[in-house]
Image (spheres, rainbow, N blue to C red):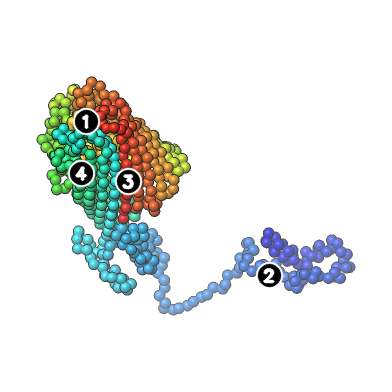
Amino acid sequence: MSLSVSILPLVALAMGPQAGGQAASASVPDDQKESIPAPSNVPPSVESGPDAEDALIDGRRRPGLEKDLPDPIIQENIGAVRAPPPEAFPTDQFPVPDRWRLIESLGVVKENWFDPYNQNTYKGDRPICIPTDEEQERREQLGLPACKTPKFLGLKSKDEWFFVVNAISDTVIEPRSFPIPVGVQTTNRPDSLDVFGRADSLVLAQTFITGFALIKGQTAYKPPDVEYRLTLATQVNHVDVPERRVLFVEPSEGTERTDFFVGLQELFVDYHFRNTSDRYDFDSGRIGIQPFQADFRGFLFQDNQLGVRYFGTRDNNRVQYNLGAFWRLEKDTNSGLNDILATPRSDFVFFANIYRQDFPLVGLTSQASITYNMNREGGDIEIDDNGFPVRPALIGDLRGRDYDVVYLGYAVDGRVGRFNLTGQLYGAFGEDRNSIFTSQPADIAAYFAAAELSYDYDFMRFRLSGLFASGDGDPENNTEGGFDAIFENPIFAGADTSYWIRQTIPFAGGGRAVSINGRNGILNSLRSSKEQGQSNFNNPGTILAGIGADFDLTPEVRVSTNANHLWFHKTDTLQTLRNEGSIPTDIGWDLSVAGIWRPKATQNIVFRLSAAAFDPSDGFSDLFAQSGDTDIFYSVLFNAILAF
C-alpha cells in the first residue's frame, strides 16, 4: 500500500511538461495554455522538468540501471614482491586449527570434569595432553599448564589420543513371589506340612560399573585406529527368602544372604587394520574380554566373554561382518559377573555372521549366521558358591556331558512401510555324547522362531509378539528335539519387565537345583543355571503369544504394557522326570506394566518401576499344585540408573 502512495504520484510528476502538455492539450485551447498556472503542490524541481534518473528515491535502484564504474587505479611499486600465483595455494584442503584447540584459544569453553554434556576431556571430546614443541610454546603463550607425555602403552607425542571415562550406578529393588520348595531335611516353619512353602522373597542389588578407554584417532567419521578398554563391575546383593536350603545347600546357613563381588567385564585391545573405501569401510580386530550379541534381540548368545573377533564393513557400511571365537569364562554364582580368578570353562563358541541393509526390502536389515558351540565339560564336577552342583546338573542320569551343536540362523530387523518388524529363525543340529535319559549318544535337531510386529501411531506403539522353541517329544529315543540357547538375554515380549523372563521357577520334584526356566531368559530349558550350567536339549520347549503397547506420554515419561500367554510345546520330558501320566501344556498368563522416567530426557538418569503378575493355568498348577495360599504370583522391580 505504501508503494502505491509514494511512487505513483512521483512517476506522474516525473513525466515532465510534455506529458502534462499532452494532457492539457486535450482539454484546453492553444491560446490559453500559457495562461494556466502551475499547480501549487508541484515542487519547483518538477516545474523545471528534471530528468527521470534524478527522481529516484535514495537507496533504491531502477531495475536494469548500472552505475558507471570508477576509473581504475594504477599502482606502480617497482621492486615489490608479487603475490604467489593461484596454483601455489591448495584447492582441496586448507590447514586450520582443530576444533578443540580453536575453541580453547578463543576461550569459548571452560571445562568441568563432572559435566558430561559439554566439552570434557574425560569423555573423549578433545585429546589428552600429548605435547610437541609447538604445542608447549602455544600453551605458554596462552598461559595454560604444560603438557606431560604419558609413559604407558607406547603413546607418541605426534599422536592424538582420547581418554573416556564411564561410570554407572545400577540400583535394583525387587520384591517377588514364586513357588519355593520346602527342603527335604529341614524347613523354616516346622509346624507346617507342605511340598511348597511361602512364596514371597526380596532381592536388593547395587552395581557400580566403571569403564576406561584410551582411543587413538579422530573417531567422528571413521573407526578408531587403536582402542584399549577396561570395565569393572562391583556388586553388592542381598536376598531374603522364607525357606531354608534355597540360598545355601546347608540348612544351618539360614534364609538371608549378603554377597559382594568384583567382575572384569571388559578388557580388550581393538586394532584398526585398514580402510577399504573413501567412506571409511574398514577391517578391524579385537582380542580380550568383550561384549558380543549373536542376533538382534539376544536370543542365542549375548554376553561379555574372552575371545578374538575380526569384523568390518563394506559397501558404504551397508554390509557388516563378524568372524571370531570365544572361550567362556566362569561366572560368579550370585552376581552373574565374570570370575577371572576361576579356570575358564571347557566351552567354546565359534561364529560367523553377515548383515546386509535394505535386503530383501528397503528398510530391512538381514542377518545370516552360523554359530558352533563345542562343549567338553563331560568330566567336570562344578559346585557353585552356595554349595549346589551345577555341572553336571542333578537331573536324569546325573552324568556329565560333552556336546557339539551348530546353530544356523537368519534374522531380519527394520521396517516395512509403517510397520516395524523383527524376526529370528534358528535351527540347532549336532550331537549330545550322553543323553540324560538314555546315557547314550543322541542327535540334536531343534528349532526356534520368533517375531515381533509393531505399528506407530502418534505417541503410541502397538506390538504383537510370537515365539516358538521346539520341545523334545520322546526323551527315550536317540534324538533330542528341545531347543536351548548358549547364553540368552532376550529383549523381547516385555524383556525383564515380564514375570516369566525375570523370575526363575525351580523344577521341584523332577530334579535338584534345576529350574524350568532361567533368570533373564525365556526358554524352558531345565538347566541348573544359565550362567554356570550346560545347554540341555531334552526340554519341553516354549510357545509364547503376546500383545503390548508403549506410550510416550512426554519426552521424559514412557508407559509400557504387555500381556503374554505361555505354553509348553511338549510335556513328555516333564512327565518322565516327574513320573506323571500327563501334564497339560498350558502354563499361564503373564501380565506386566512399566513406567520409565528420564528427568533430563537423556539416558544418563533413568528410573523404572514395573509390576508383573502371573496367573497360572493347568500345566503350571499341575507342577506346583501346593504352592501356597495364592494362585497369583507377582514381581515388582524398581530400577535406578545414573550414568556419567
Image quadrant in which you'd find residue 446: top left
Identify residue type, mark 4.
Glu
Instruction: Mark 4 or mark 3: name the one nearer the start of the chain.
Output: 4
Disc sitting over residue 256 in the figure: 4
Q: Report the mark closest to the observer, 2 or 3.
A: 3
Dot 3 corresponds to which residue? Answer: 638
Disc sitting over residue 238 in the figure: none
Quarter holding the C terminus is: bottom left
Q: Badge 1 local density, few (<14 within 10 Å), some, or many (20+)?
A: few
**Of 61 and 422, the residue lying toward us:** 422
**Looking at the image, which residue is at 23% across and 20% down?**
581
Q: CA distance from mark 1 to mark 3?
A: 32 Å
Dot 2 corresponds to which residue? Answer: 54
Identify residue type, mark 2.
Asp
**Looking at the image, which residue is at 19% across and 29% down?**
509
Q: CA distance from mark 4 to mark 2?
A: 101 Å
Q: Secondary structure at mark 1?
A: loop
**Of 67 and 281, the residue lying toward us:** 281
Specify the farthest residue to the bottom: 78
Identify residue type, mark 1.
Asp
Q: Is residue 279 left or right of residue 203?
A: right
Image quadrant in which you'd find residue 393: top left
**Looking at the image, which residue is at 14% across and 37% down?**
389
Task: Tell me: residue 509, above or below residue 247.
Answer: above
Q: Is residue 433 left or right of residue 18?
A: left
Quarter holding the N terminus is: bottom right
